[in-house]
Amino acid sequence: MLIVRRGMVLIAGLSLAGCTADENPASQDSTGDTAASSTGDSGTDPDSSSGPPLGDSGSDSTTGGSSEDGVDSSDSGSGSTGDSLVDEGCPECLVLATGLQSGRGIAVNDTHVFWSDEGAGTIHRIAKGGGGGMIIVRDAGTPYELALDDQHLYWTSNADDGAVLRVPVGGGETELVASAINPRTVDVAGGSVYWGGYDGVSGELYRAPVDPLGPAENIGSFLGGGISDLVATETNVFASTHTELDDVAFIVPPPNGPPVGSVFMLDPDNIDPEQMPLVTGMAQPWGLALSGDTLVWANGDGVAMHAPNSIQSAEIGSAAAVQLAGDQAAPWGIAADAEFVYWTDSNTVNAVRIAGGTPEVLATQQNAARYITVDDAFVYWVTADQVMQRPKP
Protein backbone atom coordinates (compact mmCIF):
# COMPACT_ATOMS: atom_id res chain seq x y z
CA MET A 1 0.00 0.00 0.00
CA LEU A 2 1.36 3.40 -0.98
CA ILE A 3 0.71 6.22 1.48
CA VAL A 4 1.67 9.88 1.01
CA ARG A 5 1.88 12.02 4.14
CA ARG A 6 3.18 15.58 4.29
CA GLY A 7 5.61 15.10 1.44
CA MET A 8 6.91 11.73 2.62
CA VAL A 9 6.34 8.53 0.68
CA LEU A 10 5.66 5.56 2.91
CA ILE A 11 5.54 2.03 1.58
CA ALA A 12 3.81 -0.28 4.02
CA GLY A 13 4.98 1.85 6.92
CA LEU A 14 8.54 2.62 5.80
CA SER A 15 10.03 5.80 4.35
CA LEU A 16 12.01 6.15 1.13
CA ALA A 17 15.22 7.99 0.28
CA GLY A 18 15.32 11.45 -1.19
CA CYS A 19 11.86 12.45 0.05
CA THR A 20 11.04 15.18 2.53
CA ALA A 21 9.45 13.76 5.62
CA ASP A 22 8.59 13.83 9.26
CA GLU A 23 10.79 11.50 11.23
CA ASN A 24 9.53 7.93 11.01
CA PRO A 25 10.21 6.26 14.37
CA ALA A 26 12.31 3.13 13.90
CA SER A 27 10.74 -0.08 15.04
CA GLN A 28 12.40 -2.21 17.67
CA ASP A 29 13.79 -5.59 16.77
CA SER A 30 11.18 -8.06 17.94
CA THR A 31 13.44 -11.12 17.81
CA GLY A 32 15.47 -10.61 20.98
CA ASP A 33 18.81 -9.75 19.30
CA THR A 34 19.24 -6.42 21.05
CA ALA A 35 21.98 -4.07 22.12
CA ALA A 36 22.03 -5.77 25.50
CA SER A 37 23.52 -8.92 23.97
CA SER A 38 26.86 -9.76 25.53
CA THR A 39 28.28 -11.25 22.33
CA GLY A 40 26.62 -9.42 19.47
CA ASP A 41 25.29 -12.80 18.30
CA SER A 42 24.78 -16.21 19.80
CA GLY A 43 25.31 -19.78 18.80
CA THR A 44 21.60 -20.39 18.61
CA ASP A 45 20.85 -16.96 17.07
CA PRO A 46 17.26 -16.20 18.03
CA ASP A 47 16.79 -14.03 14.93
CA SER A 48 17.22 -16.98 12.61
CA SER A 49 13.79 -18.39 13.43
CA SER A 50 11.91 -15.34 12.20
CA GLY A 51 10.50 -14.60 8.77
CA PRO A 52 8.16 -16.50 6.46
CA PRO A 53 8.99 -20.09 5.46
CA LEU A 54 10.84 -20.84 2.25
CA GLY A 55 8.97 -22.90 -0.32
CA ASP A 56 10.27 -26.35 -1.21
CA SER A 57 11.39 -25.21 -4.64
CA GLY A 58 13.33 -22.26 -3.27
CA SER A 59 11.78 -19.99 -5.89
CA ASP A 60 10.24 -16.60 -5.23
CA SER A 61 7.04 -16.02 -7.12
CA THR A 62 6.56 -12.41 -6.02
CA THR A 63 9.73 -10.40 -6.47
CA GLY A 64 9.77 -6.64 -6.37
CA GLY A 65 10.00 -5.94 -10.08
CA SER A 66 10.19 -2.14 -10.29
CA SER A 67 12.12 0.18 -12.57
CA GLU A 68 15.79 0.83 -11.85
CA ASP A 69 15.26 3.71 -9.45
CA GLY A 70 11.51 3.96 -9.27
CA VAL A 71 9.56 3.40 -6.09
CA ASP A 72 7.86 0.04 -6.13
CA SER A 73 4.52 0.26 -4.39
CA SER A 74 4.91 -3.29 -3.13
CA ASP A 75 8.03 -2.42 -1.14
CA SER A 76 7.19 -3.14 2.47
CA GLY A 77 10.50 -2.66 4.17
CA SER A 78 12.86 -0.20 2.60
CA GLY A 79 13.40 3.48 2.42
CA SER A 80 15.07 6.65 3.47
CA THR A 81 14.26 10.23 4.05
CA GLY A 82 17.60 11.55 2.85
CA ASP A 83 18.38 14.96 4.30
CA SER A 84 15.18 15.11 6.36
CA LEU A 85 15.90 12.23 8.75
CA VAL A 86 18.85 12.81 11.08
CA ASP A 87 20.24 9.98 13.16
CA GLU A 88 21.26 11.38 16.54
CA GLY A 89 24.08 8.87 16.87
CA CYS A 90 25.52 9.75 13.47
CA PRO A 91 24.81 13.28 12.22
CA GLU A 92 27.10 12.62 9.21
CA CYS A 93 25.01 9.63 8.16
CA LEU A 94 22.36 9.26 5.52
CA VAL A 95 19.56 6.97 6.70
CA LEU A 96 18.88 4.83 3.65
CA ALA A 97 16.11 2.77 5.24
CA THR A 98 14.22 2.73 8.49
CA GLY A 99 11.52 0.56 10.04
CA LEU A 100 13.17 -2.81 9.40
CA GLN A 101 11.85 -5.70 11.47
CA SER A 102 15.26 -7.32 11.95
CA GLY A 103 17.98 -6.11 9.61
CA ARG A 104 20.86 -8.50 9.04
CA GLY A 105 23.03 -8.62 5.88
CA ILE A 106 24.31 -5.84 3.62
CA ALA A 107 26.20 -5.64 0.32
CA VAL A 108 26.99 -2.94 -2.24
CA ASN A 109 27.89 -2.76 -5.90
CA ASP A 110 28.76 0.31 -8.01
CA THR A 111 25.26 1.78 -7.88
CA HIS A 112 23.12 0.19 -5.16
CA VAL A 113 22.94 -0.95 -1.56
CA PHE A 114 21.30 -4.31 -0.81
CA TRP A 115 20.15 -5.59 2.57
CA SER A 116 18.22 -8.43 4.15
CA ASP A 117 15.42 -8.01 6.65
CA GLU A 118 15.49 -11.36 8.41
CA GLY A 119 12.38 -10.64 10.44
CA ALA A 120 10.30 -9.75 7.38
CA GLY A 121 11.83 -12.46 5.19
CA THR A 122 12.67 -9.92 2.49
CA ILE A 123 15.66 -8.58 0.53
CA HIS A 124 15.81 -4.96 -0.62
CA ARG A 125 17.73 -2.61 -2.86
CA ILE A 126 18.13 1.17 -2.93
CA ALA A 127 20.35 3.53 -4.91
CA LYS A 128 23.47 4.74 -3.15
CA GLY A 129 22.80 8.12 -1.64
CA GLY A 130 19.07 7.36 -1.54
CA GLY A 131 16.40 7.82 -4.17
CA GLY A 132 14.24 4.88 -5.15
CA GLY A 133 13.91 1.54 -3.43
CA MET A 134 12.42 -1.86 -4.09
CA ILE A 135 11.96 -5.31 -2.64
CA ILE A 136 13.83 -7.69 -4.93
CA VAL A 137 12.84 -10.86 -3.04
CA ARG A 138 9.68 -11.06 -0.99
CA ASP A 139 9.73 -14.69 0.25
CA ALA A 140 13.44 -15.05 1.07
CA GLY A 141 13.08 -17.46 4.00
CA THR A 142 15.22 -16.21 6.88
CA PRO A 143 17.73 -14.18 4.85
CA TYR A 144 21.06 -13.75 6.60
CA GLU A 145 24.33 -12.77 4.90
CA LEU A 146 24.54 -11.40 1.33
CA ALA A 147 27.15 -11.56 -1.44
CA LEU A 148 27.31 -10.05 -4.93
CA ASP A 149 28.87 -10.74 -8.29
CA ASP A 150 28.21 -8.79 -11.48
CA GLN A 151 24.95 -10.57 -12.26
CA HIS A 152 23.45 -11.94 -9.06
CA LEU A 153 22.83 -11.35 -5.39
CA TYR A 154 23.37 -14.46 -3.23
CA TRP A 155 22.06 -15.05 0.28
CA THR A 156 21.76 -17.69 2.96
CA SER A 157 18.39 -18.63 4.44
CA ASN A 158 19.59 -19.52 7.92
CA ALA A 159 17.43 -22.37 9.24
CA ASP A 160 17.60 -26.10 9.95
CA ASP A 161 15.97 -26.64 6.55
CA GLY A 162 17.73 -23.64 5.01
CA ALA A 163 19.13 -22.89 1.59
CA VAL A 164 21.56 -20.82 -0.43
CA LEU A 165 19.79 -18.83 -3.13
CA ARG A 166 20.37 -16.11 -5.70
CA VAL A 167 18.42 -13.52 -7.67
CA PRO A 168 19.42 -11.12 -10.47
CA VAL A 169 20.70 -7.85 -9.01
CA GLY A 170 17.79 -5.97 -10.61
CA GLY A 171 15.19 -8.40 -9.31
CA GLY A 172 13.55 -11.35 -11.04
CA GLU A 173 13.33 -15.10 -10.63
CA THR A 174 14.95 -16.58 -7.53
CA GLU A 175 17.14 -19.64 -8.07
CA LEU A 176 17.98 -22.31 -5.53
CA VAL A 177 21.76 -22.82 -5.36
CA ALA A 178 21.59 -25.61 -2.78
CA SER A 179 19.61 -26.79 0.21
CA ALA A 180 21.67 -26.52 3.40
CA ILE A 181 21.52 -26.97 7.15
CA ASN A 182 21.89 -23.65 8.97
CA PRO A 183 23.84 -21.85 6.26
CA ARG A 184 25.11 -18.62 7.78
CA THR A 185 27.85 -16.97 5.73
CA VAL A 186 28.27 -16.67 1.96
CA ASP A 187 30.74 -15.18 -0.54
CA VAL A 188 31.33 -15.43 -4.27
CA ALA A 189 34.64 -15.30 -6.17
CA GLY A 190 36.46 -16.98 -9.03
CA GLY A 191 33.34 -18.40 -10.62
CA SER A 192 32.12 -20.14 -7.45
CA VAL A 193 29.80 -19.33 -4.57
CA TYR A 194 30.97 -20.45 -1.10
CA TRP A 195 28.95 -20.88 2.07
CA GLY A 196 29.42 -22.18 5.58
CA GLY A 197 27.17 -24.06 7.97
CA TYR A 198 26.72 -23.12 11.61
CA ASP A 199 24.92 -25.85 13.50
CA GLY A 200 26.90 -26.48 16.68
CA VAL A 201 27.97 -29.96 15.54
CA SER A 202 30.06 -29.71 12.38
CA GLY A 203 30.69 -26.58 10.40
CA GLU A 204 30.54 -27.61 6.76
CA LEU A 205 32.15 -25.46 4.07
CA TYR A 206 30.77 -25.78 0.53
CA ARG A 207 31.17 -24.32 -2.93
CA ALA A 208 29.22 -24.53 -6.19
CA PRO A 209 29.91 -23.18 -9.69
CA VAL A 210 27.77 -20.20 -10.65
CA ASP A 211 27.86 -20.00 -14.45
CA PRO A 212 25.98 -22.18 -14.93
CA LEU A 213 24.88 -23.31 -11.49
CA GLY A 214 26.27 -26.71 -10.58
CA PRO A 215 26.17 -29.20 -7.71
CA ALA A 216 27.57 -28.32 -4.30
CA GLU A 217 30.93 -29.70 -3.20
CA ASN A 218 32.00 -30.09 0.43
CA ILE A 219 35.47 -28.56 0.82
CA GLY A 220 35.86 -28.67 4.59
CA SER A 221 34.39 -29.74 7.93
CA PHE A 222 35.15 -28.17 11.31
CA LEU A 223 33.92 -29.89 14.45
CA GLY A 224 32.43 -27.48 16.92
CA GLY A 225 30.22 -24.48 16.36
CA GLY A 226 30.92 -24.18 12.68
CA ILE A 227 31.71 -21.38 10.23
CA SER A 228 30.96 -17.93 11.61
CA ASP A 229 32.23 -15.97 8.56
CA LEU A 230 34.19 -16.50 5.37
CA VAL A 231 35.99 -14.52 2.67
CA ALA A 232 36.64 -16.01 -0.77
CA THR A 233 39.28 -14.93 -3.29
CA GLU A 234 40.22 -16.25 -6.72
CA THR A 235 42.48 -18.88 -5.14
CA ASN A 236 41.68 -19.31 -1.44
CA VAL A 237 38.93 -19.33 1.16
CA PHE A 238 39.41 -17.86 4.63
CA ALA A 239 37.04 -18.85 7.41
CA SER A 240 36.54 -17.93 11.05
CA THR A 241 35.37 -20.89 13.09
CA HIS A 242 34.16 -21.57 16.60
CA THR A 243 36.28 -24.60 17.13
CA GLU A 244 39.75 -25.64 18.22
CA LEU A 245 42.16 -28.40 17.27
CA ASP A 246 40.99 -30.57 20.19
CA ASP A 247 37.40 -30.43 18.85
CA VAL A 248 36.03 -28.16 21.56
CA ALA A 249 32.42 -27.45 20.64
CA PHE A 250 30.91 -23.97 20.65
CA ILE A 251 27.46 -25.05 21.81
CA VAL A 252 28.95 -26.96 24.76
CA PRO A 253 31.65 -24.71 26.28
CA PRO A 254 34.80 -26.28 27.71
CA PRO A 255 35.04 -26.47 31.52
CA ASN A 256 37.67 -23.75 31.87
CA GLY A 257 35.75 -20.95 30.21
CA PRO A 258 34.00 -19.88 27.01
CA PRO A 259 34.90 -21.60 23.74
CA VAL A 260 37.83 -20.65 21.57
CA GLY A 261 38.14 -20.56 17.83
CA SER A 262 40.45 -20.35 14.85
CA VAL A 263 40.95 -18.58 11.53
CA PHE A 264 41.65 -20.94 8.61
CA MET A 265 42.89 -20.62 5.04
CA LEU A 266 41.95 -23.34 2.55
CA ASP A 267 42.82 -23.97 -1.07
CA PRO A 268 39.51 -25.33 -2.43
CA ASP A 269 41.28 -27.01 -5.35
CA ASN A 270 43.68 -28.85 -3.07
CA ILE A 271 41.54 -30.00 -0.18
CA ASP A 272 43.62 -31.15 2.77
CA PRO A 273 41.66 -32.56 5.72
CA GLU A 274 44.68 -31.95 7.96
CA GLN A 275 44.95 -28.30 6.94
CA MET A 276 46.09 -26.26 9.92
CA PRO A 277 44.50 -22.99 10.95
CA LEU A 278 46.38 -19.74 10.45
CA VAL A 279 45.61 -18.44 13.94
CA THR A 280 44.30 -20.44 16.91
CA GLY A 281 43.21 -19.70 20.47
CA MET A 282 40.87 -16.84 19.58
CA ALA A 283 37.77 -15.98 21.59
CA GLN A 284 34.73 -16.72 19.42
CA PRO A 285 35.89 -15.09 16.15
CA TRP A 286 32.88 -13.59 14.35
CA GLY A 287 33.25 -11.25 11.38
CA LEU A 288 36.21 -11.73 9.02
CA ALA A 289 37.59 -9.43 6.31
CA LEU A 290 40.63 -9.26 4.04
CA SER A 291 42.76 -6.26 3.04
CA GLY A 292 45.57 -7.25 0.69
CA ASP A 293 47.56 -9.85 2.60
CA THR A 294 46.11 -8.91 5.98
CA LEU A 295 43.22 -10.73 7.61
CA VAL A 296 41.15 -8.89 10.23
CA TRP A 297 38.45 -10.29 12.47
CA ALA A 298 36.31 -9.57 15.52
CA ASN A 299 36.72 -11.69 18.66
CA GLY A 300 33.71 -12.19 20.92
CA ASP A 301 33.42 -13.40 24.49
CA GLY A 302 36.15 -15.43 26.16
CA VAL A 303 38.78 -15.51 28.87
CA ALA A 304 41.69 -13.08 28.94
CA MET A 305 44.20 -15.45 27.34
CA HIS A 306 42.04 -15.64 24.18
CA ALA A 307 41.84 -11.86 23.54
CA PRO A 308 38.07 -11.50 24.05
CA ASN A 309 36.02 -8.61 22.69
CA SER A 310 38.76 -7.25 20.47
CA ILE A 311 39.67 -6.55 16.85
CA GLN A 312 42.58 -8.65 15.60
CA SER A 313 44.74 -8.83 12.49
CA ALA A 314 47.30 -11.23 11.06
CA GLU A 315 49.42 -11.29 7.94
CA ILE A 316 48.76 -14.32 5.75
CA GLY A 317 51.48 -16.81 6.50
CA SER A 318 51.98 -15.57 10.04
CA ALA A 319 50.54 -17.33 13.07
CA ALA A 320 50.86 -14.21 15.22
CA ALA A 321 47.74 -12.11 15.80
CA VAL A 322 48.03 -8.36 16.42
CA GLN A 323 45.39 -6.57 18.47
CA LEU A 324 44.08 -3.40 16.81
CA ALA A 325 41.40 -2.56 19.37
CA GLY A 326 40.42 -3.98 22.75
CA ASP A 327 37.78 -3.46 25.44
CA GLN A 328 34.89 -3.79 23.01
CA ALA A 329 31.35 -4.56 24.12
CA ALA A 330 30.24 -7.08 21.47
CA PRO A 331 32.19 -6.73 18.20
CA TRP A 332 30.64 -8.60 15.31
CA GLY A 333 30.52 -7.37 11.67
CA ILE A 334 33.79 -6.19 10.08
CA ALA A 335 35.03 -4.69 6.81
CA ALA A 336 38.35 -3.34 5.58
CA ASP A 337 39.96 -1.28 2.85
CA ALA A 338 43.62 -0.50 2.18
CA GLU A 339 43.86 1.89 5.13
CA PHE A 340 41.18 1.19 7.75
CA VAL A 341 39.33 -1.60 9.50
CA TYR A 342 35.65 -0.89 10.25
CA TRP A 343 33.46 -2.85 12.64
CA THR A 344 30.14 -2.90 14.45
CA ASP A 345 30.13 -3.19 18.23
CA SER A 346 26.63 -3.50 19.64
CA ASN A 347 25.43 0.13 19.51
CA THR A 348 28.52 1.67 17.91
CA VAL A 349 30.39 1.63 14.59
CA ASN A 350 34.14 2.13 14.74
CA ALA A 351 37.32 2.36 12.66
CA VAL A 352 41.05 1.97 13.21
CA ARG A 353 43.99 2.08 10.83
CA ILE A 354 45.23 -1.33 9.72
CA ALA A 355 48.73 -0.20 10.64
CA GLY A 356 47.50 0.49 14.18
CA GLY A 357 46.52 3.59 16.10
CA THR A 358 43.71 4.99 18.18
CA PRO A 359 40.25 3.62 17.28
CA GLU A 360 37.67 6.16 16.17
CA VAL A 361 33.94 6.00 16.88
CA LEU A 362 32.00 6.66 13.68
CA ALA A 363 28.47 6.27 15.06
CA THR A 364 26.67 5.66 18.36
CA GLN A 365 23.09 4.68 19.31
CA GLN A 366 22.92 2.17 16.46
CA ASN A 367 20.51 -0.41 17.96
CA ALA A 368 22.36 -3.69 17.48
CA ALA A 369 24.52 -2.85 14.46
CA ARG A 370 25.24 -5.96 12.42
CA TYR A 371 26.91 -6.50 9.04
CA ILE A 372 29.03 -3.70 7.59
CA THR A 373 30.66 -3.05 4.20
CA VAL A 374 32.55 -0.30 2.36
CA ASP A 375 33.18 1.11 -1.10
CA ASP A 376 35.71 3.72 -2.21
CA ALA A 377 34.08 6.61 -0.36
CA PHE A 378 31.49 5.38 2.14
CA VAL A 379 30.82 2.96 4.99
CA TYR A 380 27.47 1.13 5.01
CA TRP A 381 25.91 -0.91 7.78
CA VAL A 382 22.60 -2.40 8.85
CA THR A 383 21.12 -2.30 12.34
CA ALA A 384 18.09 -4.03 13.79
CA ASP A 385 15.88 -1.36 12.20
CA GLN A 386 17.89 0.89 9.85
CA VAL A 387 20.33 0.94 6.92
CA MET A 388 23.05 3.59 7.15
CA GLN A 389 25.55 5.30 4.85
CA ARG A 390 28.41 7.45 6.16
CA PRO A 391 31.50 9.04 4.57
CA LYS A 392 34.75 7.30 5.40
CA PRO A 393 36.94 8.96 8.03
Image: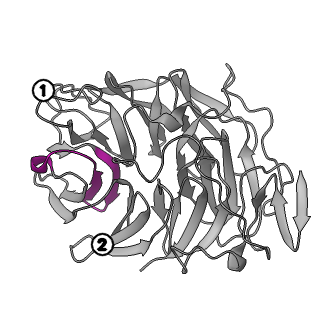
How crowded pointer 1 is (Cα within 10 Å; few <14, some 14-19, many 20+) is rated as few
Tell me the crowding category of disc 2: few under 14, some 14 to 19, or many 20 or more residues within 10 angstroms, Cα based.
many
C-alpha distance separating marks 1 and 2: 33 Å
Q: Is residue 28 above or below residue 261?
A: below
In the rendered view, tell whether residue 214 sits above or below residue 126: above
Residue 155 seen anywhere in this rendered image of the structure: yes
Q: Residue at x 14, y 55 (%)?
A: 321
Q: Is residue 338 visible?
A: no
Contact between labelled residues 2 and 1, with CB atoms less than 8 Å apart: no
Q: Is residue 214 left or right of residue 230?
A: right
Picture disc at residue 352: 2
**Residue 324 forms part of the magenta stretch:** no
Q: Residue at x 59, y 73 (%)?
A: 87
Residue 42 position in % (x across, y down): 38, 38
Residue visible at 42% across and 65% down?
348
Q: Three-letter amino acid code at disc 2?
A: Val
Residue name at image x 84 percent, y 48 percent:
74
Q: Position of residue 158 (x, y in %)?
A: 52, 32
Left or right: 78, with 65 as reference point:
left
Disc 1 or 2, which lies upstream in sequence? 1
Label 1 SS: loop
Q: Secondary structure at mark 2?
A: strand
Quadrant location, the C terminus: bottom left
Report the amino acid beneath label 1.
Asp
Foreground residue among 19 and 193: 19
Residue 90 falls left or right of residue 66: left
The residue indicated by pointer 1 is 246
**First to last magenta residue range:** 285-306
- Image x and y of residue 13, in percent: 79, 55
